[in-house]
Image (cartoon, rainbow, N blue to C red):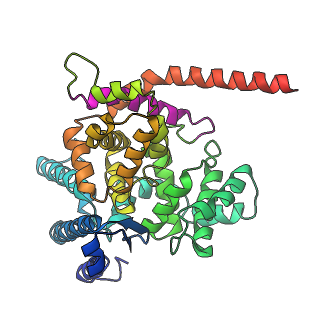
């Protein structure tokens, strides 16, 4: 796309991709629920206020697009790759790289334009570098080699295909199913420790919609699982996911500390009183990387930052959701009420700026080093718990013989 069109042509095409939503006069007057398609083809239900929010968001996307295109014109098409500050660089180049890095971080948090998203993700995530380490025909050779092979992973993938975003105009078609299947099956053979885990179907599906080609989606999935997210998040016992849940539970009282001067965090204490386990919602958030929970346009904004800043972003976003609804959560009386509040909130978070402002400005700073220390702290307890669970299972199976 970028090799055959001028930047101006691409910019015009990009602007055309972002339509203004116009509910009927009747819908505006009655404020009834309306259905509309988002930028990625998903049918969304919301009221007119939601539509107004989406239109405001799309206008911001247009403004961001103009900023990115201006930078491409002034700094060059791949200016965002010139952000590494090396000790071998001359002072002037070091300063330039540092300025680019600061500019890039700020810009990415404000959102990458949809038309630029595929190439920016592919470059900044490390997917391009990962792909460059293998023969050019790697993906095609892999797809051909595993075609027709049947494993427990391929059986589960075939079972999940029709359940992956049903009703989507492309994903829920024979062509869409075939493309998604090739990406998932290919990866299941690339990494036999992961194989296939439910949840990856939603992640891979959204990657296909953004990256446009199967091969690029495959490499984005590979870099996500192998470099961005925590190890063992999708292995058989989901140990990495269990660790993330414990880290999140430990962060919740520290990062939502309202009225906590001489007592436990109110929201955390309230959830404990209700015997609410954060894993009831957070497991899906982390395993599906919010792809099943947030509107697709908001999910893409979260992934913009995730592919640049790393897995700590997932904690920022998860904590922000709790923080945004703290008052409403404190009014709940049952576990089911808490789940309803959180699900209703995530499904209607049409304004990614609202979410990300809370995530980065109000949740507070978290470094990758801090998260890594928290993981190491939680790992022994998780492994002991999983080992105990396996022993109980083996004991039950032994009694049944």
Could you tell me residue 128's position as x and y percent?
Answer: 42, 58
**Percent of width and height locating residue 400:** 85, 26
Residue 35 lies left or right of residue 143; in this view the side is left
Q: In front: 385, or 22?
A: 22
Give the residue displayed 51% in from the left and 52% down from the top.
222
Magenta residues, as a range? 235-258
Quarter of the figure with residue 359:
top left
Residue 251 on the magenta segment: yes
Q: Is residue 242 magenta?
A: yes
Residue at 45% over, 67% down: 209
Residue 160 x/y as whole percent: 63, 58
Q: Main secondary structure of the magenta part?
A: helix
Q: Quadrant of the C terminus?
A: top right
Quadrant where the N terminus is found in the figure? bottom left
Q: Is residue 86 visible?
A: no
Relative depth, front residue between 387 and 231: 387
Quarter occupied by residue 136: bottom right
Seen in the image, is 151 located left or right of residue 271?
right
Residue at 37% from the left image edge and 43% from the top image edge: 314
């Amino acid at each position: 796309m970028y090799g055959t069109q001028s930047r101006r042509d691409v910019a015009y095409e990009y602007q055309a991709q972002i339509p203004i939503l116009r509910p009927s006069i009747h819908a505006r007057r009655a404020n009834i629920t309306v259905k509309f398609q988002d930028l990625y083809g998903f049918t969304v239900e919301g009221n007119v206020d939601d539509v107004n929010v989406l239109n405001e968001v799309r206008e911001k996307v247009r403004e961001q697009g103009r900023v990115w295109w201006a930078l491409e014109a002034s700094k060059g098409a791949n200016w965002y790759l010139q952000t590494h500050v090396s000790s071998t660089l001359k002072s002037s180049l070091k300063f330039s790289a540092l300025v680019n890095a600061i500019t890039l971080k700020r810009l990415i948090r404000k959102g990458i334009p949809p038309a630029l998203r595929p190439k920016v993700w592919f470059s900044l995530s490390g997917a391009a570098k990962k792909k460059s380490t293998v023969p050019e025909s790697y993906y095609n050779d892999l797809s051909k080699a595993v075609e027709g092979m049947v494993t427990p992973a391929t059986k589960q993938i075939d079972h999940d295909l029709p359940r992956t975003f049903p009703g989507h105009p492309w994903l829920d078609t024979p062509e869409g199913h075939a493309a998604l299947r090739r990406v998932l099956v290919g990866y299941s053979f690339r990494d036999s420790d992961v194989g296939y885990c439910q949840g990856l179907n939603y992640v891979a599906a959204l990657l296909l919609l953004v990256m446009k080609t199967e091969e690029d989606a495959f490499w984005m999935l590979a870099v996500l699982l192998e470099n961005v997210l925590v190890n063992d998040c999708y292995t058989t016992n989901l140990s990495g996911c269990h660790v993330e849940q414990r880290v999140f539970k430990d962060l919740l009282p520290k990062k939502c500390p309202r009225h906590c001067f001489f007592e436990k965090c109110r929201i955390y204490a309230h959830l404990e009183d209700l015997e609410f386990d954060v894993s009831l919602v957070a497991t899906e958030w982390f395993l599906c990387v919010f792809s099943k929970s947030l509107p697709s346009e908001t999910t893409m904004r979260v992934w913009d930052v995730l592919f640049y800043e790393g897995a700590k972003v997932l904690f920022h976003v998860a904590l922000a959701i709790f923080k945004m609804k703290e008052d409403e959560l404190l009014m709940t009386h049952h576990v089911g009420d808490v789940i309803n509040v959180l699900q209703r909130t995530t499904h209607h978070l049409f304004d990614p700026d609202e979410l990300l402002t809370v995530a980065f400005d109000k949740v507070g700073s978290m470094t990758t080093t801090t998260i890594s220390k928290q993981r190491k702290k939680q790992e022994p307890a998780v492994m002991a718990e999983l080992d105990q669970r396996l022993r109980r299972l083996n004991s039950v199976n032994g009694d049944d013989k």
